[in-house]
Structures are given as structure tokens and as C-alpha cells.
Image (tube, rainbow, N blue to C red):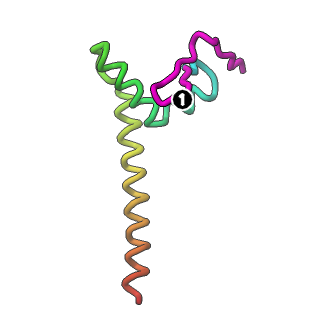
Amino acid sequence: MDLRLQMESIRRTPSGANLFPVAQGFLHDVGQFLPSDWLVQAGRTSLHGHPWPAMAWAVMIGWTMLLVAIAVVAYRRDSGRHSRR
């Protein structure tokens, strides 16, 4: 697997962090399922006027459902502790 980065592709954000695109390989495949990747794509999409892809909606809905389920479990677990006292 070749993950060479070209120095021209590295950019600085206003906060000082480095951003670089990962065009292929394992990190690209993992990034396709992270909401942060799609939020960055949303910014680019809004600038260029293209519609947001269905994959983006699926990833955002999936992460929302997962995090809501985790929050419900945590809430029930916590409220169960306090009601037994």
C-alpha cells in the first residue's frame, strides 16, 4: 500500500492544524465512514453547488442513530443507579 503524500497537498488551517487529502488506501476507506469527512465534503459541496451524495446521508444518519442509542443506554444506566438509592 502506497500512502505517499505530496508536500503541495498539505494545507494549514486557521487553527494551525495540517490537513491533507488521502486519495486511496486503508485510511481513505475508513474515512468514508466517519462523519467528519462528510462534514468537510459538505463545505466543499456548498461552495461548488453539487448535491450531497447518498453515502454522506447514510453515514450521518448511521452515526446519529448509533450515538443516540449510546446516549439512551447511558441515560438508562445512570437513572437506574439514582433511583435505587
Residue 15 horizontal/vertical position (percent): 48, 30
Above or below, comparing residue 30 to residue 41 in the picture:
below
Q: In the rendered structure, does residue 59 fall within the stretch colored magenta?
A: no
Total residue callouts: 1
**Tag 1, which secondary structure?**
loop
Residue located farthest toward the bottom when viewing the structure as drawn: 85
The residue lying at 63 percent from left, 28 percent from top is 26
Nearer to us in this view, 40 or 23: 40
The residue lying at 71 percent from left, 18 percent from top is 2
* Neighbours of disc 1 within 10 Å: few (<14), some (14-19), many (20+): few
| Quadrant of the rendered image containing residue 47 | top left
Q: In the rendered structure, does residue 9 fall within the stretch colored magenta?
A: yes
Residue 11 horizontal/vertical position (percent): 53, 18
**Quadrant that contains the N terminus:** top right
Query: What's drawn in magenta, residue-wise?
Result: 1-20
Residue 77 horizontal/vertical position (percent): 43, 72
Residue located farthest toward the right when viewing the structure as drawn: 1
The residue lying at 38 percent from left, 35 percent from top is 58
Above or below, comparing residue 41 to residue 50 in the picture:
below
The residue lying at 40 percent from left, 24 percent from top is 41
Residue 76 horizontal/vertical position (percent): 39, 71
Residue under pointer 1 = 17
| Quadrant of the rendered image containing residue 40 | top left
Could you tell me what secondary structure mostly forms the magenta stretch?
loop
**Quadrant that contains the C terminus:** bottom left
